[in-house]
Image (cartoon, rainbow, N blue to C red):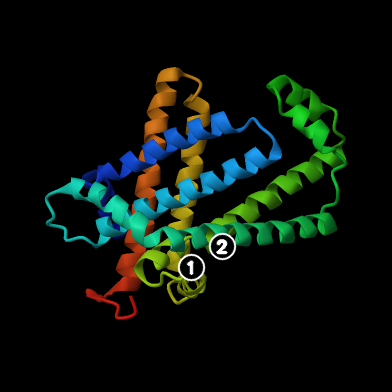
Amino acid sequence: MIKCIKNSFNLTNKYIILATPLILFSLISSLYILFSVNGNIISLVFAAVLFILMLTAFLSGWFYMIKMCVSSPENNEDPNFLIKEFPSGVGEYILPVLGLVLNTFIVSLFLLVIAYYTGMKFIGDIGISPEAFSKAIETTESLKNFLSSLTETQLFRLNAWNILLFLTMSLTYFLIMLYSPVLFFKEKNPFKAYFISLKDLFCRKFFKTLGLYLILFISYFILSVLTTIFGMNIVMHFVFTLINFYYLVFAGVLVFNYYYKNFIQIGGNLDERA
């Protein structure tokens, strides 16, 4: 695992060009969302569909770049060759990635529904209306007043719901962790790819894969806390924004590299099923 992490750091530093599409998409999507939030329901639905297509196109090209990054010969002296692969990835994988996005949404929704009914059965309703909660999170002061107005039972249930939601999202991320590498290395059919990813996830390398997930999860949690603490300062906010972009690139490279080394390049040879 340590060797894989070290190799992924080296690849991230060598192919830092991978951050360029990520930064550009983040800027463009932020502007797009900013100017499309106002309007009627039809306009919002249309904007949401366009955003999903934008996201699909970006992921198709970016994941393909990462695939080429981890599978290209180590003696490749031109790290900028990856940017030329972005259009090829969009053309080849846009439909499979669209299926990946939709399947991920379905899996997430399914687990959230299960969590909701589980919470209602074992935790119970908090007794807070959506209108009251939306007003409470408008400002820090209103949130403090809102929390101080809750009873001990409501506070207990609110914390229990937060923990349940946290565990549900953590499980969701774990269940889709190998989905993208499978789609780009083994199977373009997004439905088959997901079942293959589950099979690979729960194979004999389960604990190794779980260790990788915990490393990513804990490190991202620490980074999020530090970003929140130091993000108030403009200069530090800029620095941590760059760190977050670097981390996302590294995480993508690490997952793809881990899958390539452990499930594709078996014993130094390419798996015939790939």
Q: Where is residue 42 in the image (x, y as percent from the top left)?
A: 67, 41
Q: In which quarter of the image is the C terminus?
A: bottom left
Residue placed farthest to the bottom in the image?
272
- The residue located at (37%, 72%) in the rendering is 186
Residue 235 location in percent, x, y? 40, 19
Q: Which of the two labelled residues, at mark 1 and mark 2, occupies the earlier sequence position?
A: 2
What SS does tag 1 mark? helix
Are discs 1 and 2 less than 8 Å apart at CB? yes
Mark 2, Cα crowd under 10 Å, few <14 / some 14-19 / many 20+, is some
Is residue 175 shown left or right of residue 258?
A: right
Residue 76 in percent (x, y) is at: 13, 55
Depth check: 259 or 88 in front? 88
Left/right placement of residue 164 relative to residue 27 reads: right
Residue sitting nearer the eye, 122 or 42: 42
Is residue 5 something that shows in the picture?
A: no
Quadrant of residue 13 within the rendered picture: top left
What is the number of the mark on residue 103?
Answer: 2
**CA gap, disc 1 to disc 2?**
8 Å
Residue shown at 34%/70% (left/top)? 262
Q: In this view, does 197 lie above or below 157?
A: below
Q: Residue 190 carries which label?
A: 1
